[in-house]
Image (cartoon, helix red, strand yellow):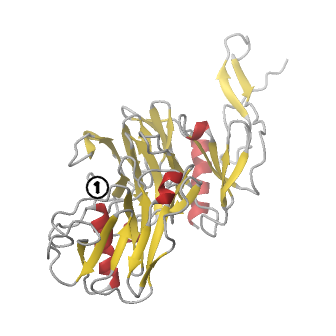
Amino acid sequence: MVQIPLGTGDYKRNVAKEARIILRNRNFEKNPVLADDQTALLVRPGMKRFMDVGAGPIRAIYSQAGSFNNAAFVVSYDTLYRLDTNGTLTTIGSGLFGTGFTDSVSMAATAPIGDVPEYLFVADGKILWVYIESGFAVGTLTASGAIANGDVIKIDTTYYQWTSGSVNAGTPAGTLANPWLVALGASNLIALDNMRLAVNGTGTAGTTYSTALTAHTTVHAIQSTSDQLVVAALASGAVGNIIATTETGANIAWGGATLAGGGAASFTQVPTPEDVGIISVGYVGSYVICVPAQGADINGRFFWIQPGETTIDPLDFATAERSPDPIFQVVVFGDQFWLPGQDTTEVWYVAGDPTNPIQRLQGVAFDRGTWEGTALKVRDSMIIVDSDGAVFQSGGGNKRISTPDIEERIRKAIAASVS
């Protein structure tokens, strides 16, 4: 009998004008039971369709054990869906994630922390979103004209008053008769930002607001612009809907007499420093790591969201130290996270230091970059594709695991993606 040699992979050599051998949907494996050439070609198992989700294409599927009752989240075309373990499919948001629908989508879910529920963060390179199953009550103060000296707002039982004078005049105490005093500033943008800092107790005491002022006990301010201040209840659920909001001022008004929306599922945009886009997110040690779209003035930088929070403090950032190359994504390994970049890959971890919580793991870095968006965790190692199309397994060193035929296909894909 004529023995037909089995190819172990695709084979094509144009220079030598060799016949092409195509290997599809099969895996080569040594088989000592076979007497002839002791090789076998195993059929790769096909995928079984579970259900149709949206119009497609499917851009991301994500699930985190212990969060949202183990539900899966699926981005199909421009829509985010929640797929529960019983097969129930719920639309969370549609008409999202840009206009090209080709960029990858990154997701990360947190775990519940005490009374703080779990969050799902979704990034598509442009907007960072957060999904909450039982959302927080929210209220918005809008300025239709110039905020005036002496204008007062009340949140729950605490009173705040803008002033163009001393923030310690009289005996400010947050009461109706003696409200906390907040610096008015030269514009609505400054006035509303100072109020945000006052509500959160994160400004400069004695300058931004009254020296004795402390952070509000039932709400926090999540955003301020040139004409709006947005606050949310600290406790999730319907309990926040009873928090009163009133104002005294000709050009300011709350959207309602109380906060609203608590207890309902919400999917909202997360403000980012200088409105940068977020391309990748990861969850490690109760922190959410956010990699912004890289550019000349932000290469190597990443932000983090504090445990239990849904907003990014502009001061919570670090920069990859080994090389100034751009970071492409974050990949989490236990209590560490890797930052694959264009030329290098760095390893960072949650240090537990209150003044410097995120630190680089000294002495561990890889002088090999990645093709954007290709880094993948597989058990205890990371698989990356470099800019030359070679596939490496990183972990205790770099091991090349691709073959020339596969690398040729990858190089063609790289060329097509940048053309």
The answer to whether residue 68 is visible is: yes
Q: Is residue 415 above or below residue 1?
A: below
Crowd class of label 1 (few under 14; some 14 to 19; many from 20; radius 10 Å): some
Query: Foreground residue, 302 or 147?
Result: 147
Q: Where residue 312 appears, x then y in whole percent? A: 37, 59
Is 166 situated above or below 29? below
In the depicted view, which residue is nearer to us: 22 or 146?
A: 146
Tell me where residue 97 appears, x and y as whole percent. Answer: 60, 64
Residue drawn at the location 78% of the way across and 39% of the way down = 49
Mark 1 lies on a secondary structure that is strand
Q: Is residue 217 left or right of residue 135?
A: left
In the displayed image of the protein, which residue is found farthest to the front?
177
Quadrant location of residue 50? top right
> x, y (%) of residue 274?
37, 71
Q: Is residue 20 above or below residue 81?
A: above
Furthest toward the right, the residue is 1
The amino acid marked with disc number 1 is Ala
- Residue 322 appears left or right of 336: left
Residue for badge 1? 318
Quarter of the C terminus within the rendering: bottom right
Q: Quadrant for the N terminus, please.
A: top right
Is 327 left, or right, of 56 in this rendering? left
Q: Nearer the viewer, residue 19 or 192?
A: 192
Instruction: Tell me residue 30's x, y (percent).
Output: 65, 19
